[in-house]
Amino acid sequence: MTLLDVRGLTVRTGDGRTLVDDLSFSVASGERLGLIGESGSGKSLTTLAVLGLLPDGMSATGSVELAGTQIVGAREKQLTAVRGRDAAVVFQEPLTALDPLMRVGRQVAEPLGRRTGLKGAALREAVGEALAQVRLPEPERIARAYPHEISGGQRQRVALALALACAPRLLIADEPTTALDVSVQAEMLDLIDALVREREMAVLFVSHDLAVVARVTDRALVLKDGRAVEEGTVHDLVRAPRAPYTRDLVASARTLESALDLRSPR
Amino acid sequence: MTGTDALEPARPKNAARAGRRVRGTATLVVGCVLAGAIALLALVSLFWLPFPADDTSGGRLTGPGEGHLLGTDKLGRDLFTQVMTGSRIAVEAGLGSVLIAAVIGVTLGVLAAFAQGWLDDTLSAFLDILIAFPTLLLAMLIVAARSATLGSAVLAIGLAQSAVVARLARILVKRVLAQDYITAARTSGTSWPRTVLGHVLPNIWPTLVVNLALQFGLAVLAEAGLSYLGLGAPPPNASWGRMLQEAQATFTTAPAGALAPGILLVLLVIGVNLIADGLRDTLDPATRRRRT
Protein backbone atom coordinates (compact mmCIF):
# COMPACT_ATOMS: atom_id res chain seq x y z
CA MET A 1 0.00 0.00 0.00
CA THR A 2 1.34 3.43 -0.88
CA LEU A 3 1.73 5.64 2.19
CA LEU A 4 3.28 8.69 0.60
CA ASP A 5 2.75 9.48 -3.04
CA VAL A 6 4.43 12.57 -4.46
CA ARG A 7 3.60 13.45 -8.07
CA GLY A 8 5.09 16.40 -9.94
CA LEU A 9 5.87 18.35 -6.76
CA THR A 10 7.19 21.82 -7.62
CA VAL A 11 8.15 24.42 -5.00
CA ARG A 12 8.57 28.04 -6.04
CA THR A 13 9.59 31.15 -4.13
CA GLY A 14 7.51 34.32 -4.23
CA ASP A 15 9.77 35.82 -6.90
CA GLY A 16 9.37 32.84 -9.19
CA ARG A 17 12.55 30.82 -8.61
CA THR A 18 11.98 27.09 -8.78
CA LEU A 19 13.59 25.24 -5.87
CA VAL A 20 12.05 21.80 -6.31
CA ASP A 21 11.24 20.86 -9.87
CA ASP A 22 8.67 18.27 -10.90
CA LEU A 23 9.64 15.71 -8.26
CA SER A 24 7.88 12.35 -8.13
CA PHE A 25 8.40 9.45 -5.74
CA SER A 26 6.44 7.20 -3.48
CA VAL A 27 6.98 5.37 -0.21
CA ALA A 28 5.00 2.25 0.63
CA SER A 29 3.99 1.31 4.17
CA GLY A 30 7.04 0.06 6.05
CA GLU A 31 9.38 0.99 3.21
CA ARG A 32 12.51 3.09 3.58
CA LEU A 33 13.48 5.67 1.01
CA GLY A 34 16.60 7.83 1.09
CA LEU A 35 16.75 11.33 -0.36
CA ILE A 36 20.34 12.17 -1.23
CA GLY A 37 21.62 15.51 -2.40
CA GLU A 38 23.96 18.36 -1.59
CA SER A 39 22.80 21.35 0.44
CA GLY A 40 20.48 23.52 -1.62
CA SER A 41 19.23 20.59 -3.67
CA GLY A 42 15.75 20.91 -2.20
CA LYS A 43 15.80 17.93 0.15
CA SER A 44 14.60 19.74 3.24
CA LEU A 45 12.00 21.73 1.31
CA THR A 46 10.61 18.46 0.00
CA THR A 47 10.18 17.14 3.54
CA LEU A 48 8.49 20.36 4.65
CA ALA A 49 6.21 20.31 1.61
CA VAL A 50 5.16 16.76 2.50
CA LEU A 51 3.71 18.16 5.75
CA GLY A 52 2.43 21.40 4.23
CA LEU A 53 4.92 23.44 6.27
CA LEU A 54 6.71 25.44 3.59
CA PRO A 55 8.20 28.73 4.80
CA ASP A 56 6.23 31.93 4.15
CA GLY A 57 6.26 33.08 0.56
CA MET A 58 6.90 29.64 -0.94
CA SER A 59 4.21 27.74 -2.74
CA ALA A 60 3.89 24.13 -3.80
CA THR A 61 2.13 22.75 -6.86
CA GLY A 62 1.63 19.18 -7.96
CA SER A 63 0.32 16.45 -5.73
CA VAL A 64 1.43 15.15 -2.33
CA GLU A 65 -0.78 12.39 -0.99
CA LEU A 66 0.03 11.33 2.56
CA ALA A 67 -2.00 8.35 3.77
CA GLY A 68 -4.79 9.33 1.39
CA THR A 69 -4.88 13.04 2.31
CA GLN A 70 -3.99 15.58 -0.35
CA ILE A 71 -1.50 17.95 1.30
CA VAL A 72 -1.06 20.53 -1.45
CA GLY A 73 -3.74 23.17 -0.95
CA ALA A 74 -5.18 21.47 2.13
CA ARG A 75 -6.78 23.47 4.93
CA GLU A 76 -4.84 24.14 8.14
CA LYS A 77 -7.23 21.99 10.16
CA GLN A 78 -6.73 18.95 7.93
CA LEU A 79 -2.97 19.46 8.01
CA THR A 80 -2.89 19.64 11.82
CA ALA A 81 -4.75 16.33 11.93
CA VAL A 82 -2.33 14.67 9.50
CA ARG A 83 0.87 15.98 11.08
CA GLY A 84 2.19 13.72 13.79
CA ARG A 85 -0.43 11.04 13.15
CA ASP A 86 0.68 10.12 9.64
CA ALA A 87 4.16 11.60 9.55
CA ALA A 88 6.58 13.10 12.08
CA VAL A 89 9.98 14.69 11.59
CA VAL A 90 13.37 14.48 13.27
CA PHE A 91 15.31 17.61 12.38
CA GLN A 92 18.99 18.15 11.75
CA GLU A 93 19.79 20.54 14.56
CA PRO A 94 18.52 19.11 17.86
CA LEU A 95 19.34 22.19 19.93
CA THR A 96 17.13 24.53 17.93
CA ALA A 97 14.43 21.91 17.36
CA LEU A 98 13.64 21.78 21.08
CA ASP A 99 11.95 24.62 22.95
CA PRO A 100 14.73 26.11 25.12
CA LEU A 101 12.37 27.17 27.92
CA MET A 102 10.44 23.92 28.26
CA ARG A 103 11.60 20.88 30.18
CA VAL A 104 12.35 17.94 27.91
CA GLY A 105 9.71 15.78 29.57
CA ARG A 106 6.93 18.29 28.94
CA GLN A 107 7.90 18.56 25.28
CA VAL A 108 7.63 14.81 24.85
CA ALA A 109 4.43 14.77 26.91
CA GLU A 110 2.72 17.18 24.52
CA PRO A 111 2.27 14.90 21.48
CA LEU A 112 2.17 11.80 23.67
CA GLY A 113 -0.68 13.13 25.79
CA ARG A 114 -2.55 14.27 22.71
CA ARG A 115 -2.31 10.86 21.08
CA THR A 116 -2.92 8.60 24.07
CA GLY A 117 -5.14 10.87 26.19
CA LEU A 118 -3.04 10.03 29.26
CA LYS A 119 -2.76 12.57 32.08
CA GLY A 120 -0.83 13.17 35.29
CA ALA A 121 1.24 10.34 36.70
CA ALA A 122 0.36 7.92 33.89
CA LEU A 123 1.55 10.43 31.32
CA ARG A 124 4.75 11.04 33.27
CA GLU A 125 5.39 7.33 33.30
CA ALA A 126 4.75 7.09 29.55
CA VAL A 127 7.20 9.95 28.97
CA GLY A 128 9.82 8.07 30.98
CA GLU A 129 9.20 4.97 28.85
CA ALA A 130 9.42 7.00 25.65
CA LEU A 131 12.78 8.41 26.74
CA ALA A 132 14.02 4.98 27.83
CA GLN A 133 13.08 3.56 24.43
CA VAL A 134 15.56 5.86 22.69
CA ARG A 135 18.11 4.50 25.19
CA LEU A 136 18.58 7.63 27.22
CA PRO A 137 20.24 6.97 30.56
CA GLU A 138 18.29 8.11 33.64
CA PRO A 139 15.13 9.06 31.75
CA GLU A 140 13.60 10.67 34.87
CA ARG A 141 16.52 13.06 35.20
CA ILE A 142 16.53 13.87 31.47
CA ALA A 143 12.78 14.52 31.59
CA ARG A 144 13.35 17.24 34.18
CA ALA A 145 16.24 18.85 32.29
CA TYR A 146 16.11 21.81 29.93
CA PRO A 147 17.51 21.17 26.42
CA HIS A 148 20.70 23.14 27.13
CA GLU A 149 21.43 20.91 30.10
CA ILE A 150 21.88 17.71 28.08
CA SER A 151 24.40 16.76 25.40
CA GLY A 152 23.91 16.99 21.65
CA GLY A 153 23.51 13.25 21.23
CA GLN A 154 20.99 13.13 24.07
CA ARG A 155 19.07 16.02 22.53
CA GLN A 156 18.79 14.21 19.22
CA ARG A 157 17.51 11.14 21.06
CA VAL A 158 14.91 13.34 22.74
CA ALA A 159 13.93 14.70 19.31
CA LEU A 160 13.57 11.13 18.08
CA ALA A 161 11.47 10.24 21.14
CA LEU A 162 9.32 13.27 20.38
CA ALA A 163 8.73 12.14 16.79
CA LEU A 164 8.07 8.54 17.84
CA ALA A 165 5.68 9.70 20.59
CA CYS A 166 3.28 10.60 17.79
CA ALA A 167 3.44 6.98 16.57
CA PRO A 168 3.53 8.14 12.95
CA ARG A 169 3.19 5.78 10.00
CA LEU A 170 6.01 7.64 8.27
CA LEU A 171 9.12 8.92 10.04
CA ILE A 172 10.85 11.73 8.19
CA ALA A 173 14.47 12.04 9.26
CA ASP A 174 15.97 15.27 7.94
CA GLU A 175 19.76 14.89 8.30
CA PRO A 176 19.27 13.49 11.81
CA THR A 177 22.96 12.68 12.30
CA THR A 178 24.68 15.56 10.53
CA ALA A 179 25.09 17.69 13.66
CA LEU A 180 26.48 14.80 15.70
CA ASP A 181 29.98 13.39 16.28
CA VAL A 182 30.83 10.45 14.06
CA SER A 183 30.78 7.96 16.93
CA VAL A 184 27.39 9.21 18.11
CA GLN A 185 26.18 9.16 14.49
CA ALA A 186 26.58 5.40 14.20
CA GLU A 187 24.69 4.78 17.48
CA MET A 188 21.91 7.08 16.34
CA LEU A 189 21.57 5.32 12.99
CA ASP A 190 21.42 1.91 14.67
CA LEU A 191 18.82 3.24 17.07
CA ILE A 192 16.63 4.62 14.29
CA ASP A 193 17.05 1.37 12.40
CA ALA A 194 16.02 -0.76 15.38
CA LEU A 195 13.09 1.39 16.53
CA VAL A 196 11.64 1.71 13.05
CA ARG A 197 11.96 -2.03 12.47
CA GLU A 198 10.06 -2.77 15.71
CA ARG A 199 7.25 -0.44 14.73
CA GLU A 200 7.16 -1.33 11.03
CA MET A 201 7.31 2.34 10.26
CA ALA A 202 8.07 3.78 6.85
CA VAL A 203 11.08 6.11 6.69
CA LEU A 204 11.97 9.01 4.46
CA PHE A 205 15.63 9.52 5.24
CA VAL A 206 17.19 12.75 4.03
CA SER A 207 20.95 13.16 3.95
CA HIS A 208 23.84 14.49 1.92
CA ASP A 209 25.89 11.51 3.01
CA LEU A 210 25.68 8.47 0.77
CA ALA A 211 27.24 6.22 3.40
CA VAL A 212 24.67 7.23 6.01
CA VAL A 213 21.77 6.65 3.63
CA ALA A 214 23.20 3.30 2.57
CA ARG A 215 23.19 2.20 6.19
CA VAL A 216 19.51 2.87 6.81
CA THR A 217 17.57 2.61 3.56
CA ASP A 218 17.25 0.14 0.75
CA ARG A 219 16.10 2.51 -1.99
CA ALA A 220 17.27 6.05 -2.68
CA LEU A 221 16.50 9.06 -4.81
CA VAL A 222 19.33 11.37 -5.84
CA LEU A 223 18.47 15.06 -6.00
CA LYS A 224 20.39 17.81 -7.76
CA ASP A 225 19.19 21.42 -7.99
CA GLY A 226 15.65 20.41 -7.12
CA ARG A 227 15.45 17.65 -9.76
CA ALA A 228 15.59 13.91 -9.34
CA VAL A 229 18.59 12.67 -11.30
CA GLU A 230 18.46 9.01 -10.42
CA GLU A 231 16.41 6.54 -8.45
CA GLY A 232 17.08 2.96 -7.55
CA THR A 233 18.21 0.57 -4.86
CA VAL A 234 21.18 1.76 -2.85
CA HIS A 235 23.03 -1.32 -4.03
CA ASP A 236 22.58 -0.40 -7.71
CA LEU A 237 23.35 3.27 -7.11
CA VAL A 238 26.68 2.46 -5.52
CA ARG A 239 27.61 -0.40 -7.86
CA ALA A 240 26.54 1.12 -11.15
CA PRO A 241 25.65 4.80 -10.95
CA ARG A 242 24.12 6.00 -14.21
CA ALA A 243 23.78 9.78 -13.78
CA PRO A 244 27.05 11.78 -13.80
CA TYR A 245 26.16 13.43 -10.47
CA THR A 246 25.61 10.08 -8.78
CA ARG A 247 28.95 8.91 -10.15
CA ASP A 248 30.61 11.99 -8.56
CA LEU A 249 28.87 11.27 -5.26
CA VAL A 250 29.98 7.66 -5.19
CA ALA A 251 33.51 8.58 -6.28
CA SER A 252 33.93 11.20 -3.56
CA ALA A 253 32.55 8.86 -0.93
CA ARG A 254 35.08 6.25 -2.08
CA THR A 255 37.94 8.78 -2.00
CA LEU A 256 37.18 9.57 1.62
CA GLU A 257 37.01 5.92 2.49
CA SER A 258 40.29 5.11 0.74
CA ALA A 259 41.98 8.02 2.50
CA LEU A 260 41.08 6.27 5.72
CA ASP A 261 42.49 2.96 4.41
CA LEU A 262 45.79 4.57 3.40
CA ARG A 263 46.34 6.22 6.72
CA SER A 264 45.26 3.44 9.01
CA PRO A 265 48.15 1.40 10.44
CA ARG A 266 48.49 -1.98 8.81
CA MET B 1 23.26 21.95 43.35
CA THR B 2 25.88 19.30 42.63
CA GLY B 3 23.35 17.34 40.57
CA THR B 4 22.85 20.38 38.37
CA ASP B 5 26.57 20.95 37.97
CA ALA B 6 27.11 17.41 36.76
CA LEU B 7 24.55 18.02 34.04
CA GLU B 8 26.04 21.29 32.91
CA PRO B 9 28.52 20.89 30.06
CA ALA B 10 31.77 22.71 30.87
CA ARG B 11 31.28 25.96 29.04
CA PRO B 12 33.48 28.95 29.75
CA LYS B 13 30.42 31.17 29.44
CA ASN B 14 28.91 29.61 32.56
CA ALA B 15 31.14 31.49 34.99
CA ALA B 16 30.20 34.83 33.45
CA ARG B 17 26.56 33.82 33.42
CA ALA B 18 26.67 32.80 37.07
CA GLY B 19 28.24 36.16 37.94
CA ARG B 20 25.49 37.95 36.08
CA ARG B 21 22.95 35.92 37.97
CA VAL B 22 24.32 36.83 41.37
CA ARG B 23 24.50 40.50 40.43
CA GLY B 24 21.01 40.21 38.98
CA THR B 25 19.69 38.83 42.25
CA ALA B 26 21.31 41.66 44.25
CA THR B 27 19.85 44.26 41.87
CA LEU B 28 16.48 42.58 42.17
CA VAL B 29 16.59 42.67 45.98
CA VAL B 30 17.51 46.38 46.14
CA GLY B 31 14.84 47.21 43.56
CA CYS B 32 12.21 45.21 45.43
CA VAL B 33 13.11 46.96 48.73
CA LEU B 34 12.80 50.44 47.19
CA ALA B 35 9.60 49.77 45.24
CA GLY B 36 8.23 47.57 48.03
CA ALA B 37 8.61 50.35 50.63
CA ILE B 38 6.57 52.71 48.48
CA ALA B 39 4.04 50.00 47.67
CA LEU B 40 3.68 49.45 51.43
CA LEU B 41 3.10 53.18 51.94
CA ALA B 42 0.41 53.03 49.26
CA LEU B 43 -1.18 49.98 50.85
CA VAL B 44 -1.29 51.59 54.30
CA SER B 45 -2.84 54.74 52.82
CA LEU B 46 -5.87 52.67 51.82
CA PHE B 47 -6.69 52.00 55.50
CA TRP B 48 -5.05 54.73 57.51
CA LEU B 49 -3.87 58.29 56.95
CA PRO B 50 -2.30 60.55 59.63
CA PHE B 51 -4.78 63.35 58.83
CA PRO B 52 -7.91 63.58 56.66
CA ALA B 53 -7.03 64.77 53.16
CA ASP B 54 -8.88 68.09 53.64
CA ASP B 55 -7.69 68.82 57.19
CA THR B 56 -6.13 72.30 57.24
CA SER B 57 -5.77 72.67 61.02
CA GLY B 58 -1.97 72.48 61.01
CA GLY B 59 -1.24 76.04 59.98
CA ARG B 60 0.38 77.02 56.70
CA LEU B 61 3.85 75.96 55.63
CA THR B 62 4.96 74.66 59.00
CA GLY B 63 8.28 72.85 58.96
CA PRO B 64 8.75 69.13 59.65
CA GLY B 65 7.97 67.95 63.18
CA GLU B 66 5.29 68.97 65.74
CA GLY B 67 2.75 66.32 64.84
CA HIS B 68 3.31 66.81 61.12
CA LEU B 69 6.12 64.49 60.08
CA LEU B 70 6.98 66.48 56.95
CA GLY B 71 5.21 69.73 57.83
CA THR B 72 2.28 71.27 55.97
CA ASP B 73 1.68 72.87 52.59
CA LYS B 74 0.53 76.44 51.82
CA LEU B 75 -3.09 75.52 52.62
CA GLY B 76 -2.16 73.89 55.93
CA ARG B 77 -2.63 70.28 54.78
CA ASP B 78 -0.35 67.58 56.18
CA LEU B 79 2.41 66.77 53.68
CA PHE B 80 2.98 63.20 54.82
CA THR B 81 -0.70 62.45 54.29
CA GLN B 82 -0.41 63.83 50.77
CA VAL B 83 2.75 61.87 50.08
CA MET B 84 1.00 58.67 51.15
CA THR B 85 -2.02 59.35 48.95
CA GLY B 86 0.40 60.23 46.17
CA SER B 87 2.21 56.92 46.48
CA ARG B 88 -1.11 55.11 46.13
CA ILE B 89 -1.91 57.10 43.00
CA ALA B 90 1.56 56.49 41.56
CA VAL B 91 1.33 52.73 42.09
CA GLU B 92 -2.21 52.66 40.70
CA ALA B 93 -1.12 54.65 37.66
CA GLY B 94 1.83 52.32 37.06
CA LEU B 95 -0.13 49.10 37.49
CA GLY B 96 -3.15 50.33 35.52
CA SER B 97 -1.10 51.58 32.58
CA VAL B 98 1.05 48.46 32.43
CA LEU B 99 -2.03 46.24 32.61
CA ILE B 100 -3.63 48.08 29.68
CA ALA B 101 -0.34 48.11 27.77
CA ALA B 102 0.24 44.40 28.39
CA VAL B 103 -3.24 43.21 27.39
CA ILE B 104 -3.66 45.42 24.31
CA GLY B 105 0.02 45.42 23.36
CA VAL B 106 0.64 41.67 23.53
CA THR B 107 -2.62 40.80 21.78
CA LEU B 108 -1.97 43.29 19.01
CA GLY B 109 1.68 42.28 18.74
CA VAL B 110 0.93 38.57 18.41
CA LEU B 111 -1.75 39.24 15.79
CA ALA B 112 0.57 41.59 13.90
CA ALA B 113 3.31 38.95 13.91
CA PHE B 114 0.96 36.50 12.18
CA ALA B 115 -0.21 39.04 9.62
CA GLN B 116 1.43 38.92 6.22
CA GLY B 117 1.79 41.12 3.19
CA TRP B 118 -0.16 44.39 3.14
CA LEU B 119 -1.84 43.69 6.50
CA ASP B 120 1.57 43.38 8.16
CA ASP B 121 2.73 46.66 6.57
CA THR B 122 -0.48 48.45 7.60
CA LEU B 123 -0.27 47.25 11.20
CA SER B 124 3.40 48.21 11.51
CA ALA B 125 2.73 51.67 10.08
CA PHE B 126 -0.23 52.07 12.45
CA LEU B 127 1.93 51.17 15.45
CA ASP B 128 4.70 53.53 14.32
CA ILE B 129 2.22 56.39 14.01
CA LEU B 130 0.80 55.59 17.44
CA ILE B 131 4.30 55.64 18.93
CA ALA B 132 5.10 58.96 17.24
CA PHE B 133 1.84 60.47 18.56
CA PRO B 134 2.68 62.47 21.73
CA THR B 135 1.33 60.91 24.92
CA LEU B 136 0.52 64.39 26.21
CA LEU B 137 -1.70 65.17 23.23
CA LEU B 138 -3.42 61.79 23.56
CA ALA B 139 -3.98 62.47 27.27
CA MET B 140 -5.44 65.92 26.55
CA LEU B 141 -7.80 64.41 23.99
CA ILE B 142 -8.97 61.73 26.40
CA VAL B 143 -9.33 64.21 29.25
CA ALA B 144 -11.34 66.48 26.93
CA ALA B 145 -13.58 63.58 25.94
CA ARG B 146 -14.00 62.29 29.49
CA SER B 147 -12.81 64.36 32.43
CA ALA B 148 -9.60 64.99 34.32
CA THR B 149 -9.48 61.86 36.45
CA LEU B 150 -6.81 59.34 37.28
CA GLY B 151 -8.65 56.89 35.00
CA SER B 152 -8.29 59.21 32.00
CA ALA B 153 -4.59 59.65 32.65
CA VAL B 154 -4.04 55.90 33.06
CA LEU B 155 -6.02 55.18 29.90
CA ALA B 156 -3.95 57.67 27.92
CA ILE B 157 -0.63 56.38 29.24
CA GLY B 158 -1.70 52.75 28.83
CA LEU B 159 -2.81 53.26 25.22
CA ALA B 160 0.39 55.08 24.34
CA GLN B 161 2.47 52.33 25.92
CA SER B 162 0.51 49.51 24.33
CA ALA B 163 1.85 50.67 20.95
CA VAL B 164 5.41 50.32 22.24
CA VAL B 165 4.68 46.93 23.78
CA ALA B 166 2.87 45.76 20.62
CA ARG B 167 5.82 46.65 18.43
CA LEU B 168 8.20 44.81 20.73
CA ALA B 169 5.89 41.79 21.00
CA ARG B 170 5.53 41.68 17.21
CA ILE B 171 9.29 41.51 16.68
CA LEU B 172 9.76 38.96 19.47
CA VAL B 173 6.97 36.72 18.18
CA LYS B 174 8.31 36.92 14.62
CA ARG B 175 11.73 35.86 15.84
CA VAL B 176 10.32 32.94 17.82
CA LEU B 177 8.09 31.83 14.93
CA ALA B 178 11.19 31.49 12.74
CA GLN B 179 12.74 29.03 15.20
CA ASP B 180 13.03 25.34 14.41
CA TYR B 181 11.21 24.28 17.57
CA ILE B 182 8.07 25.98 16.33
CA THR B 183 8.30 24.03 13.06
CA ALA B 184 9.04 20.93 15.13
CA ALA B 185 5.95 21.50 17.28
CA ARG B 186 3.90 22.06 14.12
CA THR B 187 5.17 18.85 12.52
CA SER B 188 3.96 16.87 15.50
CA GLY B 189 0.48 18.22 14.91
CA THR B 190 0.26 21.03 17.48
CA SER B 191 -2.41 23.55 16.46
CA TRP B 192 -1.62 27.27 16.18
CA PRO B 193 -3.42 28.37 19.38
CA ARG B 194 -1.61 25.68 21.38
CA THR B 195 1.72 26.58 19.77
CA VAL B 196 1.27 30.24 20.71
CA LEU B 197 0.24 29.47 24.31
CA GLY B 198 2.72 26.64 24.85
CA HIS B 199 5.81 27.79 22.98
CA VAL B 200 5.58 31.37 21.70
CA LEU B 201 4.37 33.24 24.80
CA PRO B 202 6.71 31.48 27.26
CA ASN B 203 9.64 32.30 25.00
CA ILE B 204 8.85 36.00 24.59
CA TRP B 205 7.81 36.33 28.25
CA PRO B 206 11.24 37.04 29.86
CA THR B 207 11.99 39.93 27.48
CA LEU B 208 8.43 41.18 27.72
CA VAL B 209 8.36 41.19 31.54
CA VAL B 210 11.56 43.24 31.66
CA ASN B 211 10.07 45.75 29.24
CA LEU B 212 6.79 45.92 31.19
CA ALA B 213 8.74 46.68 34.39
CA LEU B 214 10.47 49.54 32.57
CA GLN B 215 7.08 50.71 31.27
CA PHE B 216 5.84 50.79 34.88
CA GLY B 217 8.52 53.33 35.77
CA LEU B 218 7.77 55.38 32.67
CA ALA B 219 4.04 55.30 33.46
CA VAL B 220 4.66 56.63 36.98
CA LEU B 221 6.71 59.48 35.53
CA ALA B 222 4.12 60.17 32.84
CA GLU B 223 1.33 60.31 35.42
CA ALA B 224 3.34 62.74 37.54
CA GLY B 225 3.88 64.86 34.43
CA LEU B 226 0.18 64.86 33.55
CA SER B 227 -0.79 65.73 37.14
CA TYR B 228 1.77 68.52 37.14
CA LEU B 229 -0.11 69.95 34.17
CA GLY B 230 -3.47 69.43 35.87
CA LEU B 231 -4.48 66.51 33.63
CA GLY B 232 -4.26 63.83 36.31
CA ALA B 233 -6.20 62.94 39.43
CA PRO B 234 -8.31 65.89 40.64
CA PRO B 235 -7.98 67.38 44.18
CA PRO B 236 -8.18 66.47 47.00
CA ASN B 237 -6.33 63.38 45.79
CA ALA B 238 -2.76 64.54 46.11
CA SER B 239 -0.70 63.17 43.27
CA TRP B 240 3.07 63.62 43.48
CA GLY B 241 3.01 65.56 40.24
CA ARG B 242 0.48 68.06 41.56
CA MET B 243 2.30 68.34 44.88
CA LEU B 244 5.43 69.33 42.97
CA GLN B 245 3.49 71.90 41.01
CA GLU B 246 1.87 73.36 44.14
CA ALA B 247 5.14 73.49 46.05
CA GLN B 248 7.00 75.15 43.19
CA ALA B 249 6.24 78.73 44.30
CA THR B 250 7.29 78.13 47.90
CA PHE B 251 10.30 75.93 47.20
CA THR B 252 12.85 78.33 48.69
CA THR B 253 10.97 78.88 51.96
CA ALA B 254 9.48 75.39 52.43
CA PRO B 255 11.48 72.89 50.37
CA ALA B 256 9.92 69.82 52.04
CA GLY B 257 6.77 70.16 49.94
CA ALA B 258 8.72 69.63 46.73
CA LEU B 259 11.51 67.41 48.05
CA ALA B 260 9.28 64.74 49.59
CA PRO B 261 7.25 63.82 46.49
CA GLY B 262 10.30 64.40 44.25
CA ILE B 263 12.52 62.01 46.18
CA LEU B 264 9.82 59.33 46.45
CA LEU B 265 9.16 59.60 42.70
CA VAL B 266 12.86 59.09 41.99
CA LEU B 267 13.09 56.16 44.45
CA LEU B 268 10.07 54.39 42.95
CA VAL B 269 11.31 54.78 39.38
CA ILE B 270 14.85 53.69 40.29
CA GLY B 271 13.33 50.76 42.21
CA VAL B 272 11.31 49.41 39.30
CA ASN B 273 14.20 49.97 36.90
CA LEU B 274 16.45 47.93 39.18
CA ILE B 275 13.76 45.24 39.27
CA ALA B 276 13.73 45.27 35.46
CA ASP B 277 17.52 44.93 35.33
CA GLY B 278 17.51 42.17 37.91
CA LEU B 279 14.76 40.29 36.08
CA ARG B 280 16.69 40.51 32.81
CA ASP B 281 19.70 38.85 34.40
CA THR B 282 17.83 36.22 36.39
CA LEU B 283 15.32 35.25 33.71
CA ASP B 284 18.08 34.23 31.30
CA PRO B 285 16.99 30.63 30.64
CA ALA B 286 20.54 29.31 30.50
CA THR B 287 21.20 30.45 34.06
CA ARG B 288 17.85 29.61 35.55
CA ARG B 289 18.17 27.17 38.40
CA ARG B 290 16.43 23.88 37.99
CA ARG B 291 13.45 23.48 40.27
CA THR B 292 13.47 19.86 41.31
Image (tube, coloured by chain):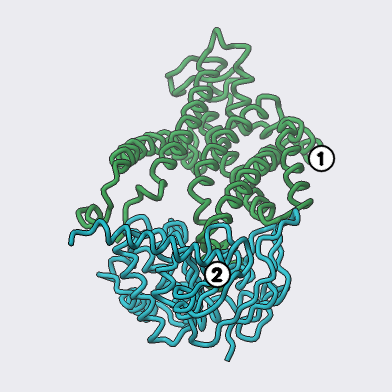
Chain colours: A cyan, B green
What residue is shown at x 53% (from left), y 64% (from top)? Answer: A37
x and y, in percent, of residue A81 in the image: 61, 79
Return the residue found at the far bottom. Answer: A1
Q: Quarter-wise, where is residue A27 in the image?
A: bottom right
The residue sitting at the left extreme is A266
Numbered disc total: 2
Residue nearer the viewer, A19 or A223: A223
In the picture, residue B73 is in which quadrant?
top right
Residue situated in front as seen by the camera: A248 or B46: A248
Question: Disc 1 versus disc 2: distance between alpha carbons?
Answer: 69 Å
Q: Is residue A122 above or below residue A209?
A: below
Output the chain of dot 2. A
Q: The disc labelled 1 sits on which kind of residue?
A: Ala
Q: Residues within 10 Å of mark 1 (few under 14, many from 20)?
A: few
Residue at the location (60% across, 69% down)?
A229
Residue B66: percent from left, percent from top: 43, 19
- The answer to whether residue B179 is visible is yes
Using the image, name the chain to which the residue with label 1 belongs: B
Residue A130 position, x and y percent, is 36, 77
**Residue that protrudes farthest toward the top in the picture:** B252
The amino acid type found where label 2 is placed reads: Val
Residue picked out by circle 2: A222
Q: Judge the density around disc 2: few (<14), some (14-19), many (≥20) Cα neighbours within 10 Å.
A: many
- Classify B138 as above or below A202: above
Q: Residue A115 placed where, x, y %? A: 49, 81
Residue A113 visible, this orientation:
no
Name the residue carrying label 1.
B145
A262 vs A122, nearest the viewer: A262
Q: Nearer the viewer, mark 1 or mark 2?
A: 2
